[in-house]
């Protein structure tokens, strides 16, 4: 077993353990903190698999921006921690049974495939080469993603602004008119 | 030589399974969004592994778009959660019953 394999299995154990802890925490803040560990582990896995640029993006966007956004919303909403999240058998058992069925089927499919035993070779896509590739072959998709991000921004502002302030201000105006 | 392709794929599958369980089992909209993030991350790991397997950059290009879509989705989703919380005072999906008369 090479050093790369040892690192991979350690990272896999770290990612699975952190994610498993995250989805069973009662307090969403603890869940988010464990999830940051999971995403940092994923970033290291991307680096191991030869995608350093994506590893940087994973740290910046997933572990940085998205998780901080979750923390902001949790703190803004003052979510009551005891949100009847207890380990009720009626909810966890069907989820684990159907998820386990899915996992078993996917394991069967993956391991029955003859090409799946091939070893991954250590290779690296440099950020420069990756950028050239993206902007030569997929520049339209990059533009579409940027428009999608702009639309997401607009939608978040529109939805998050709420209606009550607008109604209140227009109501006040209507009150002043006569 | 790192590891067999199938082991990376099974890691992605297990991560997807954890996200699925999170969505099904938790009664909290924020945890549901977290489950979706976990599932998207699992898909990204599978794409990066495929890119390393076939030595093609398409897989890595797709991960870039997955990350963009995940960022948009979480912004809009959390805005919806905030709007719903303002209306009902809860993040429990069972409390969103304003259509009931």
Image (spheres, rainbow, N blue to C red):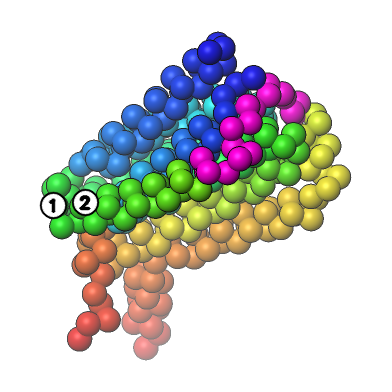
Q: Quadrant of the C terminus of chain B?
A: bottom left
Q: Residue A161 versus residue A18: which sits nearer the camera? A: A18
Q: Is residue B97 left or right of residue A123?
A: left
Query: How far from the left and from the top, in percent, is residue A34?
Result: 34, 31
Residue B39 visible somewhere in the drawing: no
Q: Residue A93 versus residue A59: which sits nearer the camera? A: A93
Chain under disc 1: A
User: Decide: marks 1, 2 in contact (CB < 8 A)?
Assistant: yes
Query: How far from the left and from the top, in percent, is residue A126?
Result: 76, 26
Q: How many marks?
A: 2
Q: Is residue B62 magenta?
A: no
Furthest residue in direction bottom, as rendered: A178
Chain under disc 2: A
- Pointer 2: what residue? A92
Q: Quadrant of the N terminus of chain B?
A: top right
Residue B65 visible somewhere in the drawing: yes
Instruction: Give the magenta-colored segment's residue range.
Output: A110-127
- Pointer 1: what residue? A88
* Residue drawn where x is 56% and y is 58% of the image: A152
């Amino acid at each position: 077993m090479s050093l790369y394999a040892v690192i991979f299995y350690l990272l896999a154990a770290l990612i699975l353990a952190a994610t498993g802890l995250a989805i069973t925490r009662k307090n969403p803040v603890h869940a988010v903190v464990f999830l940051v560990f999971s995403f940092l582990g994923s970033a290291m896995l991307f680096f191991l698999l030869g995608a350093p640029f994506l590893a940087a993006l994973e740290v910046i966007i997933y572990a940085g921006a998205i998780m901080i956004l979750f923390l902001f919303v949790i703190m803004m909403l003052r979510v009551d921690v005891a949100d009847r999240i207890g380990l009720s058998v009626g909810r966890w058992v069907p989820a684990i049974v159907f998820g386990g069925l899915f996992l078993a089927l996917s394991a069967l499919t993956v391991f029955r495939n003859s090409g799946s035993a091939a070893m991954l070779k250590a290779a690296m896509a440099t950020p420069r080469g990756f950028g050239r590739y993206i902007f030569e072959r997929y520049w339209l998709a990059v533009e579409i993603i940027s428009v999608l991000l702009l639309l997401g921004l607009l939608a978040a502002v529109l939805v998050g602004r709420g209606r009550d302030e607008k109604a209140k201000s227009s109501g006040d105006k209507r009150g002043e008119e006569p | 030589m790192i590891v067999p392709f199938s082991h990376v794929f099974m890691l992605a599958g297990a991560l997807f399974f954890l996200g699925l369980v999170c969505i099904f089992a938790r009664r909290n909209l924020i945890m549901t969004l977290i489950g979706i993030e976990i599932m998207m991350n699992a898909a990204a790991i599978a794409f990066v592994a495929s890119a390393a397997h076939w030595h093609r950059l398409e897989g890595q290009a797709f991960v870039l778009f997955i990350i963009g879509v995940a960022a948009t989705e979480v912004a809009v989703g959390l805005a919806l959660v905030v709007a719903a919380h303002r209306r009902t005072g809860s993040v429990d999906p069972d409390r969103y019953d304003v259509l009931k008369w």
